[in-house]
Amino acid sequence: MDALVNNFQPLLLAQLKSGDYVGFTFFIGSMAMAAATVFFFFQFSQVKGKWKDSMLVSGLITFIAAVHYFYMRDFWATNQASPTEFRYIDWILTVPLMCVEFYLILRAFGAKVGLLWKMIFYSVVMLVAGYLGETVFRDASPLWGFISTIGYAGILYEVWMGSAKRLSNNSNDPILQKGFNALAWFVFAGWAIYPIGYMTIETGWLAGLIPAESMDIIYNIGDAVNKIGFGLVIYSLAVSKSAQGAEQHVEAGAGKATTNA
């Protein structure tokens, strides 16, 4: 039995200490993401056609985050240090997927693959520059932060004024527009915590304003709200559009039957 335990020892989580509020939020984050993943995957069969892709991506986002939060919690409990590398690995995988969601919900209304790659490019620029400024070139963190902000601004432009916004407006679909606007607000308000957090590092413009431990708590709560909330908007949109499609199918069938009669 001891040998079996030793074999699985790397998978076991370090023990959190009483009063470790940062570690507690890592734990809550991992559990919340895992629960959301189960929910999204179980609801996959409840939506129709192209909306299955959107639900699958939502589940993948929270699944990837749940796995990373599992390891981030262990890293924090063992080292009492912020797991910066783990965070960026999580973000470099999940944030582009969140951008993909905009393309998926708009493709029925004329979204081109160019929009997809543009959003992914902006997100990668934002995250890679942020990582370099926070870990590799800390003395030049303002410069890398500026480059990262360009990527973030590109995403904001697309969803608030660019082609994605125009496709939403031209869809004449109130359900889609409501969901799209909710996602856009997540990008604007929810994602705003990340550049603020970046500016609080030692060489940042807001250095010392927010303690590192407090920033970890903000990141953990913000990540859970942003990723799960984003997925719930997609879920609501997918269910509503699937139900609308089913109603239209029934009405079309009834009209055809009446005509034949």
Image (cartoon, rainbow, N blue to C red):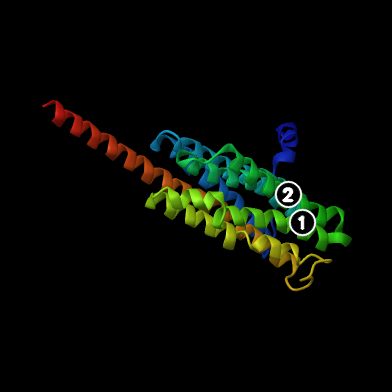
Quarter of the image for residue 5 reads top right
Q: CA distance from mark 1 to mark 2?
A: 7 Å
Q: Position of residue 192 (x, y in %)?
A: 63, 62
Residue placed most toward the observer, 219 or 245: 245
Quarter of the image for residue 116 reads top right
| Residue found at x 74% / y 40% | 10
In this rendering, the answer to whether 54 lies above or below 201 is above
Q: Position of residue 4 (x, y in %)?
A: 71, 32
Q: How many marks?
A: 2
Pointer 1 residue = 147
Residues tagged 1 and 2 counted as in contact (Cβ below 8 A)? yes
Outermost residue, top side: 260
Describe residue 112's horizontal placement relative to residue 233 as left or right. Answer: right
Q: Position of residue 167 (x, y in %)?
A: 49, 48
Quadrant of image for the N terminus: top right
In this rendering, the answer to whether 211 lies above or below 260 is below
| Residue found at x 70% / y 43% | 12
Please report whichever mark, 1 or 2, sits nearer to the chain's N-terminal start: 2
User: Three-letter amino acid code at disc 1?
Assistant: Ile
Pointer 2 residue = 125
Q: Secondary structure at mark 2?
A: helix
